[in-house]
Amino acid sequence: MSMQEFLARDDQAIAQVYFRDPVVMERGEGVFLYDIEGKRYLDFSAHYSSCCLGHSNKKLITTIEAQMSKLISVSAQFSSMERIYLAEKLLSLTNGKYAKVLFGCTGSDAIEFAIKAVKHHKKGGNIITFWRGYHGATAGSAAATGKAETIQIDENISDLLPGGFIHVSPPYCYRCDYEKKYPDCDLFCLKYIKKRVAQDGCDNIAGVIIEPVQAAGGVIIPPEGYMEKLKQLCEEMNSLLIFDEVVTGIGRTGTMFAYEHWGIYPDILVAGKALTGGYIPGSAVLMKKDIAESMDKLTLHGHTHSAYPLMCASVLANLKIIEQEKLCDNAHIVGKLLHTRLLGLKSISDKIGDVRGIGLLQGIEIVYGNGSKKADFIFAEKLYRNLLKAGVITELESSNRLESSVLVLHPPLILTKEQAEEAVEIIRNVLINLSK
């Protein structure tokens, strides 16, 4: 059966909620995916950052198979060795700064719990979140999201979103919402938060939630000093700081967690996606002692598959492989090379307005060129499509509401220098061909 015939069946049988490319995948190996016609693709999406070990990792599969023969699923009302071992492991990875862990199924439900924890512990109050940020698809996590999507803009369902969120500008220095320049701005966007809180009369700020790097917002990286001052601001407001590390956690930025780059510890840390290696769904919320103890015995949040042994075993194996194979170091080293090579592409195309990245999370901002910072949505779409045809899978974060068009690259942590060079060469050739 042909590719087009399979796609027609997909259209007929599947509710097309997600954007779908015209490709049917059949198998994966390492950093490569293969479609049903045998074509090979460099996977620079890694299942939205979750497939950190690449595809068909034998060590992880062996652990999953062994656990399936032992104990797969038991409700959260019972303990298991796997969940105890995993909780202790995660707490040890964060230098004892956190006291307890709650396990979930997805990043969305983990964020949902983190928001509930903040509101409960602080006895109510508003939560500050950021434009262009993405936190999930459940009601609370979608309300925290600052990246307008269907649930925010469809008036038929937007009333499902709860209130209590104050959205402010992120530290998007390339495209500052206040049209200022760093460092002369003296981090005006942070100072504006104080003004917003005061003018709106929202004196009770329960918490602030932020992605250390806004991935779906276009790989927005905070400038020097921002995170430290954000933490100070939280302390001034007597508010809790939540780091959404669903994308940036588990080695993606060259450290196990992105907070390590700034040396500050949020009050709540959320992990997902790559936590399990991407083969089994799972997430985790790490909390400081006073927050965790206030949540104990509170039947507030739970899912049928929360903390099930198969997920916990997968995470333990994944973390062990990452540590043994020094994949955080690899993400740092290969990510630095990838960033340098991508920067070099600016010399061949003025369509590249900016290249931003940390570790193996990189973004290429596409503009009209000739000194303009105006997003070129049409060219970005062509670049994305032609890269797919040329055998490189990326993600495109592009919309009028974002006011930007950014090609996002976040390959598996096992990416080699040679594979990074191969991908950049393909991008180079596609850019040259499109410019003709």
Image (cartoon, helix red, strand yellow):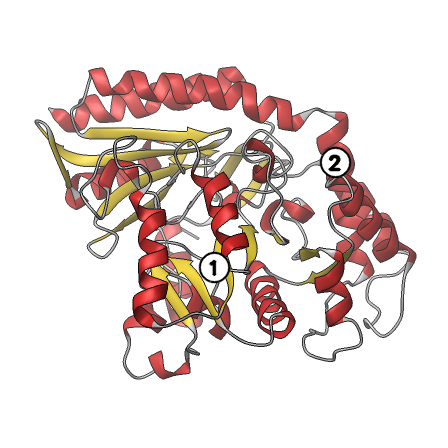
Alpha carbons under labels 2 and 1: distance apart: 31 Å
The reply to whether callout 2 and callout 1 are in contact (CB within 8 Å) is no
| Amino acid identity at mark 1 | His
Q: Would you say residue 131 is visible in this rendering? A: no
The spot of residue 62 in percent (x, y) is 81, 42
In this rendering, which labeled residue sits more in front, label 2 or label 1? Answer: 1
Q: Residue furthest left?
A: 370
The spot of residue 340 in percent (x, y) is 39, 17
Q: Is residue 61 left or right of residue 257?
A: right
Local SS, label 1 = loop
The spot of residue 276 in percent (x, y) is 68, 48
Q: Which residue is mark 1?
A: 135
Frontmost residue, 401 versus 236: 236
Which labelled disc corresponds to residue 45? none
The spot of residue 299 in percent (x, y) is 74, 80
Between disc 2 and disc 1, whose residue precedes? 2
Local SS, label 2 = helix
Residue at horizontal 22 percent and vertical 25 percent from the top: 431
Q: Is residue 76 left or right of residue 159?
A: right
Which labelled disc corresponds to residue 58? 2
Q: Is residue 330 above or below residue 320?
A: above
Residue at horizontal 37 percent and vertical 41 percent from the top: 220
Q: Is residue 144 above or below residue 372?
A: below
Within 10 angstroms of label 1, few (less than 14), some, or many (20 or more) residues? many
Residue at horizontal 87 percent and vertical 55 percent from the top: 84
Frontmost residue, 369 versus 205: 205
Residue at horizontal 73 percent and vertical 71 percent from the top: 295
| Amino acid identity at mark 2 | Lys
Within 10 angstroms of label 2, few (less than 14), some, or many (20 or more) residues? few
